[in-house]
Image (cartoon, helix red, strand yellow):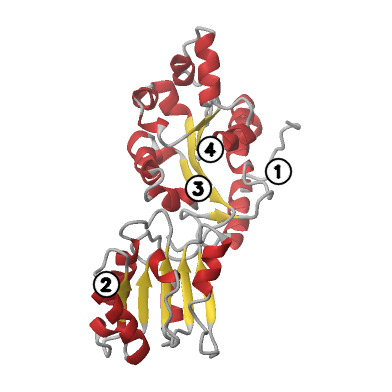
Amino acid sequence: MSDAIKFQSDEGREVLKSIVKKLIPQWPNDLFAITATGDGKSALFAVPILVHLEISKNPDQYPKFKIPLCKKPVGIVVTPTKGLANNILSYAYTRENIAQARCNELDINHSISECQYQIICVDPEHLREPEWSVFADSEPFHSNCIFACAEEGHIINEWGQDFRPLFRHIGSFFRGKLPVSQMSIFTMTATMQPGAPYDGRIFPQLIPYLNQRHKTIIHVRTIELSYHGFASVFLYLFKHAPRSYNHHRQSWMYSAIAPDGYNERTIELLINDPQCQIVIHTKAFSLGIHAKTLQDSISVGTADTQAESDQCDGRVGQSFAKCKTNYLGNCC
């Protein structure tokens, strides 16, 4: 690090604060920083470590801070994959380093408790293991932990629904086990959709398309929605249909497990009933089912093959009317 810089005025920190307040009106509230890949988000957890090390070594050359400065600063970075952890820092605490340390008969838990690692990369599943309660209760670790970060924050809700549910408990670990009053808690990502998180049981993306009042077929095929997916879509649309509609006439389901008579009635209503607007189905409908009144095709998730995708597209536009196909690959 370069030579320390001294403020020429006692108001140096206040000057910096006034500058930051102009750029960040929410000061001092929590912020969610979203910036492009390659913009240097990793600096958010590398720089604080360097700052604490530098100022703790040269306290007389810097203004006084309200927060305690740590001689052995530690930061926790929760990463979704080992590859990402290795990209952050090659000397980070990862499962590979644990294995190597154990092969060398080193007490890795003692090393972490005594703050011998400055950046600790860990997956959310590992946070539930007993040693992390030991780390959190360790006085050196507890007093030197300056931040906790969840890397790639956009997957906390995406992966936390079904794939890796412990992603949803990262925040509870941070705030339940760590000294949050003296540290920063934040997340970083390059991509984040606006709005509240949603899971595989709500489908707000469908509403704008269905408000056009076109006869629509909705293909449900994602792994996450598999067995009950088409029923989840049906129930969501049923609850959000306009009050002026007869909900029982607007939306129907077509499924291989439904009685033949029910499926036949669904097609009949789709063709002849102007109030029957939507049919939600699994794969069965895409195999040669014809309803010339269909105008729009919406796929929740992507097809397994190109041929299957073409079959879904071919369900609409058979009367040469204006039609369109939409793919909602991230609907859940």
The mark lying in front, picked from 2 and 4, is 2
Q: Position of residue 322 (x, y in %)?
A: 55, 89
Q: Earlier in the sequence, mark 1 or mark 2?
A: 1
Q: Is residue 110 above or below residue 19?
A: above
**269 horizontally vs 184: left or right:** left
Classify mark 4: helix, strand or loop.
loop
Say which of 172 and 163 sits in front: 163
The mark lying in front, picked from 3 and 4, is 4
Q: Earlier in the sequence, mark 3 or mark 4?
A: 4
Q: Position of residue 285 (x, y in %)?
A: 40, 71
Q: How many marks?
A: 4
- Give me the residue at 47% from left, 73% from top: 298
Q: Amino acid at mark 4?
A: Thr
The mark lying in front, picked from 1 and 3, is 3
Q: For residue 34, which quarter of the picture?
A: bottom right
Q: Pointer 3: what residue?
A: 187
Q: Position of residue 271 (x, y in %)?
A: 37, 88
Asked if the residues shown at circle 2 and circle 4 are in contact, with their CB atoms under 8 angstroms apart, the answer is no
The mark lying in front, picked from 1 and 4, is 4
**310 horizontally vs 162: left or right:** right
Most extreme residue toward the right, as rendered? 2
Label at residue 260: 2
Label at residue 81: 4
Q: Pointer 1: what residue?
A: 8
